[in-house]
Amino acid sequence: MARDLPKYTVPSLTPEDGARVAAILQGRLDALNDLALTLKHIHWNVVGPHFIAVHEMLDPQVDAVRLMVDATAERIATLGAAPVGTPGALVAARTWDDYAIGRASTTEHLGALDEVYVGVITDHRRAAADTEELDTVTNDLLVGHLRELELFHWFVRAHLESSGGALSTAGASTEKGAAEAARSAVTSDTAP
Ligand SMILES: [Fe+2]
């Protein structure tokens, strides 16, 4: 989508810098909207003995991420740009694939969700670094998100961690690979 230079932006930023920050935030808006939907998809599709624990763990994460979505979109508007929140635009702009797993065990979804959080947090940290000099208020917003996202990531990883501190998903680079690694770690734990 063509981006016009904003007619105004926050005091002390140039319109060009306002547009640059807004473009960075638009990428984070897409990622956070995608994450909120993916977390609900997992909430609905987990099965198995730990269903209720994982099902109920995810709703507060959805609520928190939806608040991040709103704050991100409103910061874009505050900067004088137009936030784009439609699903078609999100899918056209995103650089990642749809979440790869449907109905599956809690362990498999948690393994895949570990990968999802790695992707979102890595890109969010890059966006925070890219706005550190340009706009400290946007940087502060993103750092605040990271504080919560990294906590939620730990909630997920604590399910995948051995008493020695190793993650069952270590070395995985795809959602399906992480799901399989998490599943086989549980199977080998319980093998006679
Ligand atoms: Fe629900």
Image (tube, grey):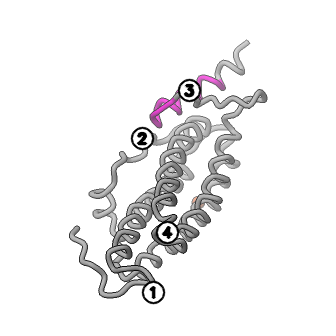
The amino acid type found where label 1 is placed reads Pro
Mark 2 lies on a secondary structure that is loop
Q: How far apart in space, not on screen, are marks 1 and 2 (Cα)?
A: 43 Å
Residue 42 shown in magenta: no
Q: Which residue in the protein does label 3 denote? A: 181
Residue 46 coordinates in the image, percent (x, y): 57, 44
Q: Residues within 10 Å of mark 4 (few under 14, many from 20)?
A: many
Q: Which residue in the protein does label 1 denote? A: 11
The stretch of residues the image draws in magenta is 172-186
Q: How many marks?
A: 4
Image-quarter location of ligand 1? bottom right
Mark 1 lies on a secondary structure that is loop
- In the picture, the disc for residue 151 is none
Q: Which residue in the protein does label 2 denote? A: 100
**Image position of 177 with respect to 33: above or below:** above
Tell me what residue is drawn at x 21 percent, y 70 percent. 2
Camera-near label (4 vs 3) is 4
Q: Which residue in the protein does label 4 denote? A: 69
Q: Is mark 4 within 8 Å of ligand 1?
A: no
Q: Residues within 10 Å of mark 2 (few under 14, many from 20)?
A: few
